[in-house]
């Protein structure tokens, strides 16, 4: 279990402890440590908000000081939004995640320390930490505790996640249409449009066809979608329930 | 106001609406839209959880369908964790943020659509959206609504944030020590250690000095810290309250 430990110092709301546990499990962190939670421990609201991460809440370890909570760890990131002027490196969450992965890869046990909702970390806790991480924000800088934990856990996971940035969810069967399928679709559509009188007047026929083909190319159709569109063209042009055109149309 | 709109469809808990508003303000998004919130509107718990983002909650717009809520927008990202097999692009949050910035730069009004806590978005809502964003997770994929909104808002802000990944928070006065200050520190320390008998036996003197210099270089001292360390050396060696060494030491 080499993911960083999450250490919450003097957390006030069980809801935030539960939300932190849930976020940890979402992103593959498991070791939760609590320093003097205000409302005692265990806490029913923490269990409730943890949802599927009840195991993390149940296995949370209780400590009575920051020094005790981090005693067996080597590298501690302290999260704070305030400037402290204490000559420590201040990292963004992304840089912090990279640093944590470097440390863990070198066999170093890491923790991320968060202060309580009202007043954050005190100077003594900061002084026991190795580096500082600050979440950049727009105008309003006060982040909810559960949200802050989530964000650091997310960055930890993001740094090792191999999900492709973009893919098409075609479902299990469909494949992108071949050019041959596309050319047959163009021919089918253009033939019916010519017969219907849509491609008129003649000098506009070519630009109209070019625009239609550009539109159909842009959607990157699947083979299934090409079959569906050809069925639609056929139904619109010759469907068995299709009424004859009115005499003066 | 070109940041994306956040659209919550059938949200159940006021707490999550409030948390979403707070996260929006943290990361510079302002337009909150609600489709049929379960407990009606306004909602006292939303106001409470919003903390400093009460203005976003107060200005939230209410709609009775997804089509109405997104009617004036052009590009809609639907957030869902489930595979839908609907042949839409599926983006990571980071890619989604890049896409949104491209669209906004081109004058396109964007929205991000989130489903309610229990069942997420329905297929009709997905079908009205342009692309899909899925937050990658470890084993436990069910994310809290407020957390999901936060993460997308964070990625939106992260893509334009210019915070340096790492800097040293020296406070307003201190500067990194010059090499001259460091060389003087080395000379002062090594002179006192030689006089104290610490650098002994003689064949270990050079390696001990090399190790001490490496340690002092590694901390990247400030000018103030160099002065402090020189004061410490002086106090330890010659401090006015320093007791004479015991006779048999």
Image: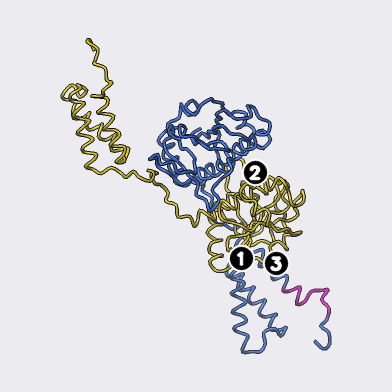
Chain colours: A blue, B yellow
B187 above or below B99? above
Q: Which residue appears farthest toward the front when viewing the image?
A: B240
Q: Which residue is mark 3?
A: A228
**Image mark 3: chain:** A
Q: Mark 3 against mark 2, which lies toward the viewer?
A: 2
Q: Mark 1 against mark 2, which lies toward the viewer?
A: 1
Horizontal arrangement in the rendering, residue B132 relative to residue B169 (left or right): right
**Image mark 1: chain:** B
Spatial CA span between label 1 and label 2: 29 Å
Magenta stretch holds residue A239: yes
Displayed quadrant of residue A219: bottom right
Judging depth in this view, the residue of B20 and B123 nearest the camera is B20
Share a chain, discs 1 and 3?
A: no
**Residue A207 in picture, x, y percent from top left:** 59, 83
- Residue at 70% across, 83% down: A198
Q: Which mark is residue A88?
A: none
Q: Which residue appears farthest toward the left when viewing the image?
A: B202
Residues marked 1 and 2 touching at CB (< 8 Å): no
Q: Which mark is residue B142?
A: 2
Q: Which residues lie in the magenta part?
A: A233-243
Crowding near the residue tagged with mark 3, few <14, some 14–19, many ≥20 C-alpha atoms within 10 Å: few
- Residue at 56% across, 55% down: B28
Q: Which residue is mark 1?
A: B109
**Image mark 2: chain:** B
């Amino acid at each position: 279990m080499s993911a960083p430990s999450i250490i919450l110092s003097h957390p006030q709301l069980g809801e935030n402890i539960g939300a932190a546990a849930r976020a940890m499990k979402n992103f593959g962190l498991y070791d939760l440590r609590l320093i003097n939670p205000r409302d005692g421990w265990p806490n029913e609201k923490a269990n409730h908000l943890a949802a599927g991460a009840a195991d993390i809440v149940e296995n949370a370890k209780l400590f009575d000081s920051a020094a005790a909570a981090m005693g067996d760890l080597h590298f501690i990131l302290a999260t704070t939004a305030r400037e402290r002027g204490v000559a420590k490196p201040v990292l963004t969450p992304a840089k912090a995640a990279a640093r944590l992965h470097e440390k863990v890869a070198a066999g170093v046990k890491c923790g991320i320390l968060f202060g309580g909702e009202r007043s954050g970390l005190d100077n003594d806790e900061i002084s026991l930490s190795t580096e500082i991480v600050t979440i950049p924000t727009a105008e309003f800088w006060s982040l909810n505790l559960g949200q802050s934990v989530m964000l650091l856990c997310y960055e930890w996971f993001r740094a090792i996640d191999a999900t492709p940035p973009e893919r098409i969810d075609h479902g299990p069967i469909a494949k992108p249409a071949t050019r041959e399928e596309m050319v047959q679709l163009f021919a089918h559509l253009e033939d019916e449009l010519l017969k219907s009188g849509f491609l008129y007047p003649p000098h506009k026929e070519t630009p109209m066809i070019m625009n239609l083909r550009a539109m159909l190319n842009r959607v990157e159709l699947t083979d299934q979608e090409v079959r569906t569109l050809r069925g639609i063209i056929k139904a619109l042009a010759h469907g068995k329930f299709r009424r004859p055109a009115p005499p003066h149309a």
